[in-house]
Amino acid sequence: MSDTPGQNGQQGQRDEAHNPVPTPEAAPAPAPTPEQAQTASALFAESMAGAARRAGFGAATEAEPISGQALLKAMGGIRGLIEAVLPGLVFLVTYTLTIDPSTDVTSDPIGTLLPSLVAPLVIGVIFVALRAITRQTTTPALGGLVGTAISVALALFSGKPSDFFLVGLWTNAGYGAVLLVSVLVRWPLIGVAVGFLMGDGVAWRLDASKRRVLTILTLCWTGLFLARLAVQLPLYLANNVELLASMKLLMGIPLYAPLLVVSWLMVRSVYRKADAADAV
């Protein structure tokens, strides 16, 4: 006896349950094309070379002798130096003149700290305005203004004037840690940045002299950031604002500039030796 339509339908459902229809699998994500990979590599190379230039290493690629003028240019010129130093100096002077050492700042942080905190903020706004008026790039001044604004907010929120320097402490700790880790994993960041700046890519890792010099340089810059942290952190914890502000100024440009010159000389020396060896 033939099956009824209902029985046929039930049988079909049972067959489908035992033999489900295969569903199409999701197509794998397409692999990046050679053009896309090349573009990403070029962007990374340019970003690392740009980081080296912003750090002041651009003069290492130039054949002209190291001079005070070249050093000044690497640090942003007279304007760049003023923008780097003046906010901290203004804070130190204003704080020293307006805060009585016997005053309990935490009882009225806004009333007592406002003059010394607003002064560097005003200086930052003036720097941005001057760059805009003279039609120069405002990015450096804006970066400094944002950093100053964050520092001011931290000090006002906590009622501790030493918190004005908290961003700098975190910055030194972060840079020092990242550079140290890069050395430990045998990819020193100064080497990566300078390699792309010099048009060498990562080929310097195959040259023992370059690898050794660039590793030493990375350790030197690591030492700079960690030395700042080692000196300034105890002063921050002791809430010694005047000495903390003074040490921040003294361990800024006065340490940065000589180390930059030494870095230029070492980079030029090792690359000239490599070029001379290749020419033989």
Image (tube, rainbow, N blue to C red):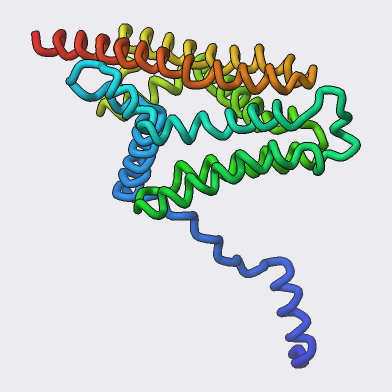
Corner quadrant of residue 191 = top left
- In the rendered image, the vertical position of residue 230 relative to residue 161, given as above or below: above
Looking at the image, the residue that sits furthest to the front is 97
Question: Viewed as shown, does residue 235 lie left or right of 142?
Answer: right
Nearer-the-camera pick, 85 or 35? 85
Q: Nearer the viewer, residue 255 or 52?
A: 255
The answer to which image quadrant residue 210 occupies is: top left
Could you tell me which residue is drawn at 88 percent across and 30 percent down? Answer: 104
Image x and y of residue 222, in percent: 53, 15
> Residue at 60% of width from left, 32% of height from top?
90
Numbered label tally: 0
Quadrant assignment for the N terminus: bottom right
Task: Determine the residue positioned at 70% across, 21% down.
Answer: 242
Asked if residue 189 shows in the view, the reply is yes
Q: Is residue 1 visible?
A: no
Q: Nearer the viewer, residue 276 or 109?
A: 109
Quarter of the image where one finds residue 156:
top right
Q: Nearer the viewer, residue 195 or 230?
A: 230
Residue at x 77%, y 30% (from the top left corner): 99
| Residue projecting furthest to the right | 107
Quadrant, the C terminus? top left
Q: Position of residue 221 (x, y in %)?
A: 48, 16
User: In the displayed image of the protein, which residue is found farthest to the bottom?
Assistant: 5
Classify residue 111 as left or right of residue 254.
Answer: right
Q: Is residue 271 above or below residue 135?
A: above
The location of residue 144, given as percent across then percent down, is 53, 40
Task: Left or right? Give the position of 131 relative to 28.
Answer: left
Q: Position of residue 229 (x, y in %)?
A: 64, 17
Q: Is residue 27 left or right of residue 114?
A: left
